[in-house]
Image (cartoon, helix red, strand yellow):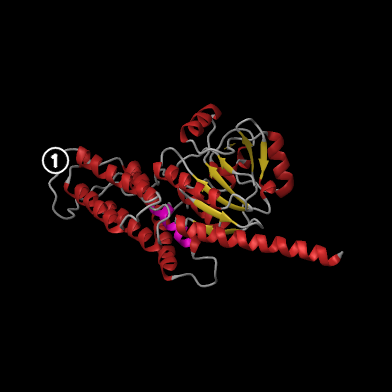
Amino acid sequence: MIGIFTILSLSLLPAAPGADDGHAAAQVGAVEPTDASGARGILKRLADLSEARQREGPEISWSRVEGVIEDLVRWVGASQEAEWPEAVEVAQRFTDLAIGATPGQRLALVHGCEQLLASGWTASDRGCLQGAQILILEALIAGGRLVGAASEPSRRAARLYEDLAESVTDPSSGAAPLYLRRSRLRLDRLRLGAPMPRFVANGTVGNELRSAQLEGEVLLIRFWDVSSPASLVAHREDARCVREFWDSPFSLIGVTKSEDREGYLRQVDAARFGGVQLFDGPISSALAAALEKQEGENVGDPGAFTGQGSSRSLCNRWGSPPPGSLFIVDARGCIRGRDLGHAATRLLVKELVAEEQARRREQILAGARSR
């Protein structure tokens, strides 16, 4: 068993081009703004709830989350523009709340973003909130593609996604923001049932790990970033699977990316994830050439690395999933689960581990019968 691997990443919520920057005053409910700390307090409550939802223990009622979102919508609707919170922080809080969320909860978060957008924001601020909506919907769409007929929430998410995609794409040039291009890449490459993209990464002492070395193991791959505290909590909770399946064909992989190796090492030390750590940064030309010889394809732009061999970095090849994203890969290297809650994740891992153990037993019996 490889153990726990942890690597470093970038968060993505850039602005959308061509969005309307008009400011229509939308009054949502009645709330008397007092000062900017009101918005700060609401965002702090959302952050606390997003982290609490990732911890093992009594389930946090979703009605509590909805209540705080309603407070935020009322605050924005009744406050002066100068008192509004930073859109990038609002977007991060909503995507944090989406980690491990159910389909209904994801749709509720998208609706909350829509209510905020109705208050009027600058073009760049609208891009942040629309980017959050795209990310929240993406996992719901991907989760409905394993079987032939998608679920109703998945179909609804697909319609909302395409409406959003049309609204943020320049109608004359067809240019789309980077977050949408990355999302479409992930929907194509990381769909359920697809083989996971190959990659090469280096350990903290420079040891190389290739995805081929993980064949025959069930993988739980969590993308995390320090800008998303909920993703850190989620990844620490993932370690329960390591304890449960310590003697099974299973490995936990933590992923984030950085071009600053020293900064990465400091972050890993502070996070105290334990186990084997991997550094995901621009790889050498030699490693890039080896991968290109294997597959003959270039991902390039999605990961936005600029160094040597950047198109071959793990995050580039996975389309830079946002912090908190979760992928469960079976022992044959196929993606079997995406963005599930902790309980559902453990159940799927248990099923896939049992599947691989049965396959290995059959191989042993077949070998014995052939002798």
Left or right: 78 as drawn, with respect to 193: left
Across and down, in percent, residue 324 comes to: 45, 48
Return the residue found at the far top: 262
Specify the quadrant that holds the C terminus. bottom right
Look at the numbered disc 1 and give the secondary structure of its residue.
Answer: loop
Residue under label 1, please give it.
34
Relative to 127, is 10 on the left or the right?
right
- Residue 47 location, quadrant: top left
Res 41 quadrant in image? top left
Q: Residue furthest bottom?
A: 149
- Residue 118 is inside the magenta segment: no
- In the image, what residue type sits under mark 1? Thr
Question: Residue at the location (81% across, 63% down)?
Answer: 367
**Residue at the (55%, 51%) spot, across then down:** 220
Q: Let me know if residue 46 appears in the view.
A: yes
At a point 40% along the width and 41% down the height, the residue shown is 229
Is disc 1 surrounded by few (<14), some (14 to 19) or many (20+) residues within 10 Å?
Answer: few
Give the overall secondary structure of the magenta segment. Answer: helix
The reply to whether the magenta stretch includes residue 134 is: yes
